[in-house]
Amino acid sequence: MSMPTQGSGLDSGYHPTAGAPHTDAEVKNSSLGDLMRQVTTDLSTLMRQEVELAKAEIRQEGKKAGKAAGLFGGAGFGGYMVALFVSIAVWQFLDNVMDSGLAALIVAVIWAVVAAVLYSAAKKNAQHVRGLKQTNDSVQRIPDALKPHPEGVTR
């Protein structure tokens, strides 16, 4: 599966004469129907390319989000282990003030460190999920003539 192209927006479905700039003579010798057909064809090609670009970006960003979700899950499990060992430590302290309770607390602190490291990694990874940046950039390059200008329209 190929990635949509960036920049000129050309792909295998593009016809060089369909989107090429036209001279004044070509435009004057063309009928309105021909010009509308060319515009419609170019817009259709542009929209297909934008949809393909969006799909490719969603797949890429989805993988990053999945990895971040897995790391957050690991941090959640680490937090669960902290709660478990802190509970065991409190129970042991009540039962046997020094020896086994202190050992359980040390294990709980280790799990707290593991959970903190996993959370930090998940947060850092989640910041790399950036949305559909290429699609947004490409859509912003659509000529102003195709964008609505409601302030200049009178009803």
Image: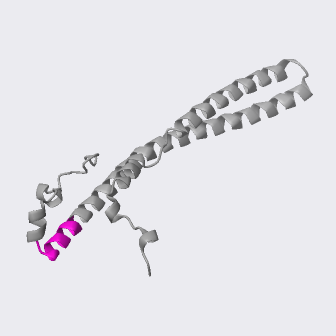
Of residues 1 and 111, which is closer to you in this image?
Answer: 1
Whether 75 is drawn above or below 153: the answer is: above
Of residues 70 and 45, which is closer to you in this image?
Answer: 45
Return the residue found at the far bottom.
155
Of residues 93 and 32, which is closer to you in this image?
Answer: 32
The percent coordinates of residue 116 (x first, y second) are 66, 30
Asked if residue 64 lies in the magenta stretch, the reply is: no
Q: Is residue 144 left or right of residue 74?
A: left
Magenta-highlighted residues = 30-41
Q: Is residue 147 left or right of residue 36?
A: right
The percent coordinates of residue 80 (x first, y second) are 70, 38
Query: Which residue is located at x 46 percent, y 69 percent?
Result: 151
Whether 6 is drawn above or below 13: the answer is: above
Whether 64 is drawn above or below 85: the answer is: below
Q: Is residue 150 left or right of residue 72?
A: left
The percent coordinates of residue 69 (x first, y second) are 55, 43
Query: Which residue is located at x 84 percent, y 23 percent?
Result: 101
Which secondary structure class fits the magenta region best? helix
Residue 30, by quadrant, is: bottom left
Quadrant for the C terminus, please.
bottom left
Query: Which residue is located at x 70 percent, y 23 percent?
Result: 110
Q: Is residue 104 left or right of residue 6?
A: right
Residue 41, by quadrant, is: bottom left
- The mark total stands at 0
The percent coordinates of residue 82 (x first, y second) are 73, 32
Q: How is the image coloured?
A: one colour
Of residues 101 and 22, which is closer to you in this image?
Answer: 22
